Image: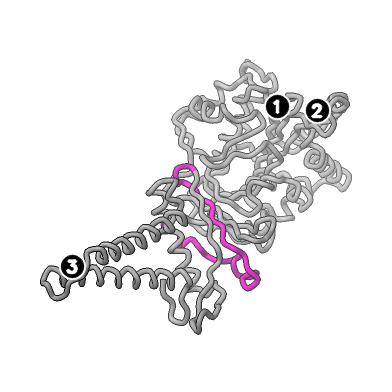
Amino acid sequence: MRQNKVKTSRYIRGQTLLAIESLLLILVVGIFLSTKYRVITVPRLVGTSILGVMILVGMCSFLLWGNRNHLNRGLIYAIRYYAICFSIRRALLDADYFVSRQFFGTAVALLPKIRLTFIDNYKRATLSIENRVKYVQRLDNVQLSSALKRYVVERSFLTDDENFYEFELFDSRIERRLKFASADALVNYGSSLEYTELFIDKFTKVPLHHALVVGQTGSGKTYGIYSLLLQMLSKPIRYQLFLADPKGSSLSILGDIIAPEHTAENIEAIIDLLRDFNDEMSQRKVELKQLLSEKLEATYSDFGLSPFVFVFDEYASFQSAVQAFDKKRRDEVNKLITQIVLQGRQLGFFLVVVMQKSDSSSLPTMIRENLPLKIVLGNAEAQTYVTAFGTGVDIPSRDYRKGEGVFTYPGIANTPKICAFSYLDFDINAAFLAKRGLCNNPRSSKGD
């Protein structure tokens, strides 16, 4: 690892060991040739001793290399660890991420400490790079993916003690997206999760909470909602679903199948649905208050209560229509929605908002900020990311295919992290027809 002006201490040690090994090798060869051709006579003990020292130095070097690169976890692990760390150190050196010190008149580069841990059979990894005062404003924005071989940075953050920058890596060759040939396969995959947990892809599962799903037409958000709804309908504890679709598209069709009494299309019916949802929440509040006398600070899930989920598709269309109402009606609607997002978590009442853009004219800032799970699918515009995640947030740069995007959730992804909704390779209508009767006691058939 060489740089024009300065060398690393590891490079100097390596060159020193190489020089010693080379000198010892020359001595051994010289002694062997001198003895063979009788140029001089050297006692065998001297030659053997020099050869022993040479082997010892080589063994020590190998042991040091093995210890540094975690050879105890296997040779493949050690080789991969060495290759990536070497590439990172070289990239940091080329980018001047080091502290220069003088050692016997020679400039020596002290690079940050690097720790690397492979996870899930090398599919993912965590990388830690030491933080130093000199880099306080630089490592936040460093682009490491080019130095990580086949790995790319998924997200980065500063550790609690601020001594290291943590980078979460994943193998770019691994397909994150799950593919299901049947609804049963999807159900079986999620059977090990808690009834309040939902999965998005192979590496992402999230607790049930208020959510915002943003994406332009064709971004895959509709199929993402299908995946979540099928999971909800397959949980051992029944979910109570309320579906609002002001444009009367696919969500309302599914609603007529699985929850016809709690599905609405026109604005007045949606407002009535919001009132019903809030009434249910008020009843749950009374029920939970009695239970909390036995277990303070508990939530609905601690008592095995059913979650209530209000899925609001094309929320911008609804908000636009509401703006035409008088102030009293607008305030009532805002109050209904606000009560859900502010009081719903402990009670088990959640709002899922689906829309193409989440700017403040379509979604009030207070409501957006109280939707902890935020997902943006597809190759969205810069402003879409800003309104969803806030300013100054870095989005992983890549070409997002349909169903792929980024998400945030407190404690899991504090900065945007890549996700990919499942590919559903089966008849969606048939899958939901099979789930009829699993929520809200719907009618046995719409036409009956």
In the image, 192: left or right of 269?
left
- Label 2 neighbour load within 10 Å: few <14, some 14-19, many 20+: few
- Residue drawn at x 48%, y 44% as measured from the top left: 176
Query: Which residue is disc 1 drawn over?
Result: 240
| C-alpha separation, residue under disc 3 versus residue under disc 1 | 87 Å
Whole-percent x, y for residue 173 in the image = 41, 49
The Cα atoms of the two marked residues, 3 and 2, are separated by 93 Å
Q: What element carries label 3?
A: helix
- Say if the magenta span includes residue 128: yes
Q: What stretch is highlighted in magenta?
A: 120-149
Residue sitting at 63 percent across and 36 percent down?
248
Q: Which of 237 and 293 is in front in this view?
A: 293
User: Mark 3 or mark 2: which is in front?
Assistant: 3
Task: Locate the C terminus by quadrant.
Answer: top right
Local SS, label 1: strand
Q: Nearer the viewer, residue 16 or 425?
A: 16
Name the residue type under label 3.
Phe
Would you place residue 184 above or below residue 32 in this image? Answer: above
**Residue drawn 71% across the image and 41% down it:** 210
Residue 54 at what x, y percent from top left? 32, 64
Residue 428 rendering spot, x and y as whole percentages = 51, 30
Q: Mark 2 points at which residue?
A: 280
Left or right of 147, for residue 55: left
Badge 3: residue crowd in 10 Å (few <14, some 14–19, many ≥20): some
Q: Mark number for residue 32? A: 3
Q: Earlier in the sequence, mark 3 or mark 2?
A: 3
Amino acid type for the residue under numbered disc 1: Gln
Q: Are marks 1 and 2 in contact (CB under 8 Å)?
A: yes
Q: Does the magenta stretch include residue 320?
A: no
